[in-house]
Amino acid sequence: MDINSVITKEEYNNIKQFDYDTFSMYLTKIVKLCVEESLKAIPSVMTHLSSQAGYLKDLSDKFYKNNKDLAEHRKIVAQTIEGIEGNNPGKPYAEILELAAIKSREVIANINKTSFGPNKNIDLEKFDGHLGKL
């Protein structure tokens, strides 16, 4: 982004009175330049987001392939991952998944120890508060 495309030094020095119309003209130029620069960035941003989504999908597939026992507990795993991510900003996602596997198994073990009556139906909503403590 080049400020000279908005106003040159010579134009600035030649301004005798900075009136509303002149001010509006320069603001309009600035807005147009910002929009143009933003639109130029969109393709690279989209490429990055697309590759990031592919990377995360591959990581997820590998995670559940290596942790088949957790595949039927995806909600618990997802909530555990969110908690770990929130407490460890910037930590590599692969490390977060390693921690999530351990913590998820702990949560599942605790759920399995809890009695829910004769049919042992598990209501995941009851465990949301407990997951946040992990």
Image: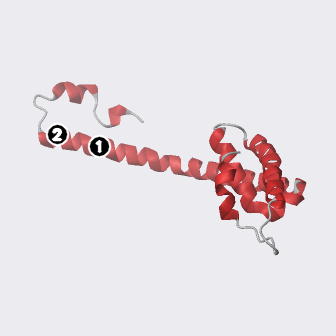
Residue 110 falls in image quadrant: bottom right
Q: Residues within 10 Å of mark 2 (few under 14, many from 20)?
A: few
- The quarter of the picture where residue 17 lies is top left
**Amino acid carrying mark 1 in the image:** Lys
Determine whether the residue tagged by mark 2 lies in a helix, strand or loop: helix
Amino acid tagged 2: Thr
Between residues 24 and 58, which one lies in front from this camera angle?
58
Residue 124 in the image: above or below residue 13:
below
Farthest bottom residue in view: 119
Q: Tell which circle, 2 or 1, labels the residue nearer the N-terminal end.
A: 2
Which percent across, then down, holds residue 29? 29, 43
Residue 125 versus residue 26 in the image, above or below: below
Depth order, front residue of 31/5: 31
Which residue is tagged 2?
A: 22
**Residue name at image x 64 percent, y 53 percent:** 129
Element at label 1: helix
Relative depth, front residue between 132 and 25: 132
- The quarter of the image holding the C terminus is top right
Q: Which colour scheme is used?
A: secondary structure
Left or right, 90 with respect to 34, comes to: right
Residue 80 percent location from the top left of the image:
71, 51
Q: Residue 29 carries which label?
A: 1
Which residue appears at 62% of the width and 51% of the height? 49
Q: Is residue 30 above or below residue 72?
A: above
Q: In which quarter of the image is residue 6?
A: top left
The residue sitting at 15% across, 29% down in the picture is: 15
